[in-house]
Image: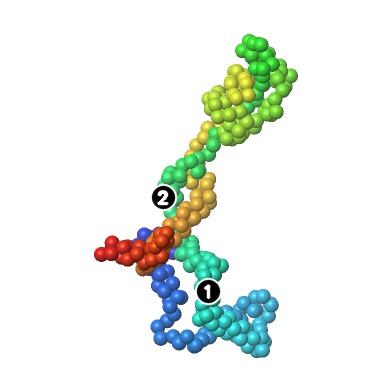
Amino acid sequence: MKRIKKTIREPLVHFLLIGAVLFLLFNFTNGPAGDKANRIVVTPGQVEQMEAMFTRSRMRPPTEQEMDGLIESYLRDEIYYREALAMGLDKDDGLIRRRMRQKVEYILEDISAQADPTDEVLIAFMQKHIDRYRLEAQISFQQVYLNPDRRKDPVGDARKMLVRLRTGTDPETLGDPIMVRHKFDLAFEREVERAFGESFARQILKLDPGDWSGPVLSGLGGHLVMVSERRNGRMPELAEVRTVVERDWLAQRKKELKDITFRKLLEGYEVVMEQPPKPGNASGTAVAATQAKEGTR
């Protein structure tokens, strides 16, 4: 089993899988060579699948008459589908086009889901997207607000309050009213930034836990701050976030496989970007197409 998983991770195998997808797409769109348009083959496997689906939904096997009905329903689907294609009803239908695209992408996603990345692969992915997985700094602190608009000497008032706070005065009895709460418990850095601004958050994350200090300035005014706990930001170990990292890695792998397959399929098509006719020149498109063709020679 380990050998199989290791093989699946090889880049060469990925390209072989893409080749298999292209082969399947070709067969789905063109059909087996020599098949007649009016020939429908109902295989034993299809009959067994119909019977199994009926049994799962009804909690009993179908009767002979019900089985005939299931086969007839399958034939109706197949015949109407083929007739619709023959009449061109699938053309210029955005809903059908999107549905067909989704089916192809589902095939590619199924292939991508077979991956089983190693720890080394996931760690490299984490290092490439550090900002996505880095754990933010957290801090617990109390603050006493000093409103500069209400104080003639904010700095002098701050010094006096610091003395009182350090001697045990209840911080809720000091300072000026403010809409922001006075106490934060292990708040994330972004939460502090939203409340007081980036500069304030940067300053208090440098303070050592233990005693009152300040004033620390914010866009609101001055603050006396006591930090009680601080947890620095860090990169987590893979084991802490493996589920998230593996999910993100798989999502990127699916996208890459879709892009590679699309580019490979695109090589088999000639894309012509028609130009709108210029005023007074009804054959502008034809001229542009002729010029483009000559330019490729």
What whole-number distance in Å separates the C-alpha atoms at marks 1 and 2? 46 Å
Q: Nearer the viewer, residue 38 or 173?
A: 38
Q: Tell me what residue is drawn at x 46 percent, y 57 percent.
A: 255
The reply to whether residue 165 is visible in this rendering is no
Callout 2 crowding tier (Cα within 10 Å): few <14, some 14–19, many ≥20:
few
Q: Is residue 261 above or below residue 27?
A: above
Q: Earlier in the sequence, mark 1 or mark 2?
A: 1
In the image, what residue type sits under mark 2? Answer: Glu
Q: What is the number of callouts on the image?
A: 2
Q: Is residue 125 above or below residue 274?
A: above
Residue to which mark 1 is pinned: 90
Q: Is residue 277 above or below residue 53?
A: above
The picture quadrant where one finds residue 158 is top right
Residue to which mark 2 is pinned: 120
Q: Tell me what residue is drawn at x 54 percent, y 82 percent.
A: 83
Q: Give percent across and percent down for residue 172.
A: 72, 22
Q: Is residue 291 above or below residue 36?
A: above
Q: Tell me what residue is drawn at x 69 percent, y 16 percent.
A: 150
Query: In the picture, which quadrant includes the C terminus?
Result: bottom left
Indicate left or right for 258 with 65 as reference. Answer: left
The picture quadrant where one finds residue 189 is top right
Q: Nearer the viewer, residue 93 or 37?
A: 93
Callout 1 crowding tier (Cα within 10 Å): few <14, some 14–19, many ≥20:
some
Indicate left or right for 67 with 31 as reference. Answer: right
Q: Give percent across and percent down for residue 176.
A: 70, 20
Q: Secondary structure at mark 2?
A: helix
Query: Which dot marks residue 16?
Result: none
Q: Tell me what residue is drawn at x 46 percent, y 58 percent.
A: 254
Q: Secondary structure at mark 1?
A: loop
Which residue ends up furthest to the left in the rendered image?
297
Q: Give percent across and percent down for residue 115.
A: 45, 60
